[in-house]
Image (cartoon, rainbow, N blue to C red):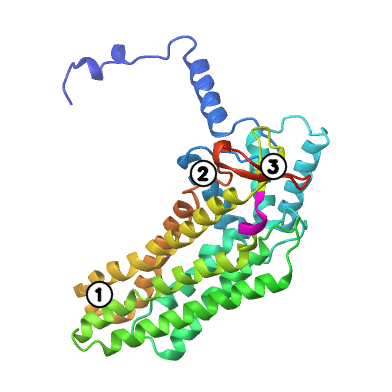
Amino acid sequence: MRAGGAADSPAALQLPAPGAAGETTAARRLDMAAEYPPFVLGRPRFEQNKFYGRFRHFLDIIDPRTLFITESRLKEAVQLLEDYKHGTLPPGVSNAELWAAQKIKQAIIHPDTNEKIFMPFRMSGYIPFGTPIVVGLLLPNQTLTSTVFWQWLNQSHNAGVNYANRNASKPSPTSKFILGYTGAVVSAVSIAVGLNSLVQRANKFSPSTRLLIQRFVPFPAVASANICNVVLMRHSELEEGIDVLDSSGQAVGSSRIAAKHALLETALTRVVLPMPILVLPPIIMSGLEKTSLLRTYPRLIIPVHSLVCLAAFGLALPLAISLFPQMSEVSANSTCFYYPASRFVELW
C-alpha cells in the first residue's frame, strides 16, 4: 500500500452522485424489460425469427427443473394464466411471474387434451431419460442382443415422446403411429446389425480400429430411422398439403410445396440432432480412455462416458431443434394452394 496515495485517502473515495441510485434502478428495470417482455398468452417469450431467440426458447422447453414442479405449484401457475385470460389478475403480478407460469404449464400439460404428460415423455424429460439410452447405444463391444435391445429402446422412447406431444387437435389414426414406429425400429435395427457385421468381417482393420468404427455405427442407424419415421408418419402431407397462414395468422389454404419444405426441414433436423450426440462421445472417449487415470481406474470409464453423453445431449438438442423456425416462410410466387372451395390455383 502506498503511503499518502490519492487512491487510499478518504478524500479520494467517490460518493454516488445525486440520482445515481435512481439511474441504477432504471437500468435494472430496462434489463428486466428486455429479459421479460410484456406477456402474451400462448406466445413464445423470445423472438422466433432469430436463431438465438429460438435457442433460448427451446432451452426453456427442455429445462429439466420443471420435472420437479409440485402439484400445488402447477395449480398456481394454471390459475394465474386463467386469471390473466379472464382479466382478473391480482395486482402486482409481474411479466416474469406470468412467463414462469406459462413455462410450467407448457412443460407439464398437453395444450390440446389439458392432461398431464407422462414424465419420461415430456420434452423437459427428454435429456434425463434419454441419456441412459444414448450411453447404452454407444457401449463398446456390442453383441447382437444388446444392439437390437438399445436400438429398440431408443425408438420406443422416441415414439412415446412423439405420441405424448402430438397435435391432438387433429386426431390421427393410431395405425399411422404404429406404422412409423415399426418402420423406425426395423430400419434402425437392420442398419445397426448390418453395419456391425460388415465391420467385424473387415479383416483389413486392426481390432482397435474395428472397435472405434463400431462406436460410430449407432449414428447412421438412428439417423436413417428418424428419416424413415418422418416419411411414414407425414407422407400424406405431400399429397394433401399443410395449412398455409398469412401474415396475420389466418389460414388461406393448403399447400403441397409448403409440405415438402416442412418435411425436408424436419428430416434435416432429425439427422442433425443425433450427430453430435452419437459422434462426439466416441471421439472424446477414444482420447480419454488413453489417459493414465482411466487406464489405472477402468471402472471410471462408464461414469465418464455417461457425463460426456449427457453434455453432448444437453448441447445438441436445443441447437438442433433451433435450426429452423416452427413457422417457415414460403414465397407465394412459387406456392400451389388448395383452397377450401376445392379450387386448385397455381400462383406463379
**Residue farthest to the top, as pictured:** 18
Instruction: Find disc 2 in the rendering and name its residue.
Output: 54
Residue drawn 64% across and 54% down? Answer: 107
Q: How many labels does the image show?
A: 3
If you read the primary sequence from the N terminus, does the residue marked by circle 2 or circle 1 appear first?
A: 2
- Residue 245 is situated, as x and y percent measured from the top left of the image, at 66, 40
Instruction: Find disc 1 in the rendering and name its residue.
Output: 289
**Dominant secondary structure of the magenta stretch?**
helix
Q: In this view, does 80 lie above or below 259?
A: above
Residue drawn 64% across and 30% down? Answer: 38
Q: What stretch is highlighted in magenta?
A: 237-242
Give 167 or 344, whichever is nearer the viewer: 344
Label 3–label 2 contact, CB within 8 A: no
Distance between the Cα atoms at labels 3 and 2? 15 Å
Residue drawn 46% across and 90% down? Answer: 145
Disc assigned to residue 42: 3
**Residue count near mark 3 (Cα–Cα under 10 Å), binned few <14, some 14–19, many ≥20:** few
- Residue 170 is situated, as x and y percent measured from the top left of the image, at 75, 57
Relative to 318, is 327 on the left or the right? Answer: right
If you read the primary sequence from the N terminus, does the residue marked by circle 1 or circle 3 appear first?
A: 3
Kind of residue indicated by mark 1: Glu
**Residue farthest to the left, as pictured:** 2
Q: Give the quarter of the figure containing the N terminus.
A: top left
